[in-house]
Image (cartoon, rainbow, N blue to C red):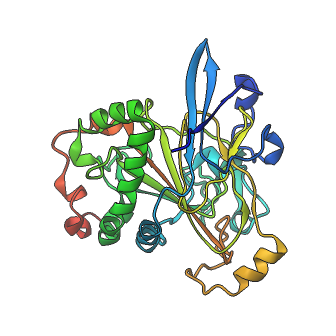
Amino acid sequence: MSEIKQLIVKKYLTDDEIKKLEGNWIDEDYMKIPVIDSDIDIYYIENGEKKLLLKFRKNVIDDNLIKIGWESYKKLAKPSRGRGASAGPIDKQGTYWSKRQIVDTKKWSTSYLLKDGRKSIMKVNNQVASNPIGFYEKTNNFPNLPCRLTHFTRTNYDKFQQGLPFIKKINELYKSLVPENYKKQWDHSDKKPELKIKDTCFSTITINRNFRTALHRDGGDFKQGFGNLTVIERGKYSGGYTILPQFGVAVDVRTNDFLAMDVHQWHSNTPIYETPEQKIYNKDLVPDYKDNPKVGTMGLYKNYTRLTFVCYLREKLANCDDNVDKRFLNPSDSKKIQ
């Protein structure tokens, strides 16, 4: 087995400089080295200590598992208006918001007027196709919901279970590549084993479809863990690199690949686009989705598909009550709590 290439990078932007870019679109101009598309471990030095930024491995997930993941989860990236800074600056001219009267807009969040003229209680973000499956803790936005299986997990439970071999492979890669952090995450997840995905150290998987994220850092996940990212694509496209602009590093994660990265560092995606040749190829694809362009969910209405899967552990699940209402964990009881 050949030795894995290692690279040590530095910060090209100060912490204050990168913070000011939160919620902005990041393009390839922030790359300081050619895009990563082969096996590599990347580190950085902080306070004299060598720290892991990411590990990338090419073609390590078998096609049969990719097929399982696609068939199980391709329909579960539902529209969401709650993705915060990652959804980008409010697109006032876009299809979705141009149909609404928005008020009190600040960067990536806005209120809007309801049909009766009242202002919406919640401030929301651009609508994107992004949805968590698995388990989630009680949140301020939904204080009446306890720790639970997410709604779309309970209502698509057979599909969720069907796809677990794909998720377990991601868990296996995490364990083999970042064992120290994996062990800490496993131990934390085992504090509430009924609130984690069986035989993994994950509680939750965020599934995104054609979602180009703006600059953000992940929040709510286990602070000593790593984000575990893979992609399933259909059709052809270019770009969509996972970029950490403070370090000038971008990774081209494609089908069969695996990326473990420090998601507590600032990251986003470069533009996703089709070349003229790719558009010709994609034109002949049989559609897998029936999206309505009038809705205006960002990134959709393309013939190609880029599904991303981010597997992680919700840190606060360890604080959940021991007597969680079993109806929120048992999909057979889902109708009782709609």
Q: Is residue 309 left or right of residue 180?
A: right
Q: Is residue 331 left or right of residue 56?
A: left
* Closer to the camera in the image, 187 or 268: 187
Q: Residue farthest to the top?
A: 48
Q: Position of residue 216 (x, y in %)?
A: 63, 40
Which residue is painted at 80% across and 37% down in the image? Answer: 32
* Closer to the camera in the image, 321 or 117: 321
* Quarter-of-image position of residue 116: bottom right
* Quarter-of-image position of residue 332: bottom left
Q: Is residue 318 left or right of residue 56?
A: left
Q: Position of residue 151 (x, y in %)?
A: 36, 62
Which residue is painted at 72% across and 84% down in the image? Answer: 283
When the figure is inspected, residue 156 is found, relative to residue 194, above or below; the finding is below
Query: Would residue 175 be seen by someone viewing this image from the given angle?
Result: yes
Quadrant of the image containing the C terminus: bottom left
* Closer to the camera in the image, 117 or 51: 51
Which residue is painted at 39% across and 30% down in the image? Answer: 180
Query: Would residue 313 be seen by someone viewing this image from the given angle?
Result: no
When the figure is inspected, residue 262 is found, relative to residue 228, above or below; the finding is above
Q: Position of residue 54 (x, y in %)?
A: 57, 37
Q: Is residue 92 left or right of residue 230?
A: right
Q: Position of residue 164 (x, y in %)?
A: 33, 61
When the figure is inspected, residue 182 is found, relative to residue 242, above or below; the finding is above
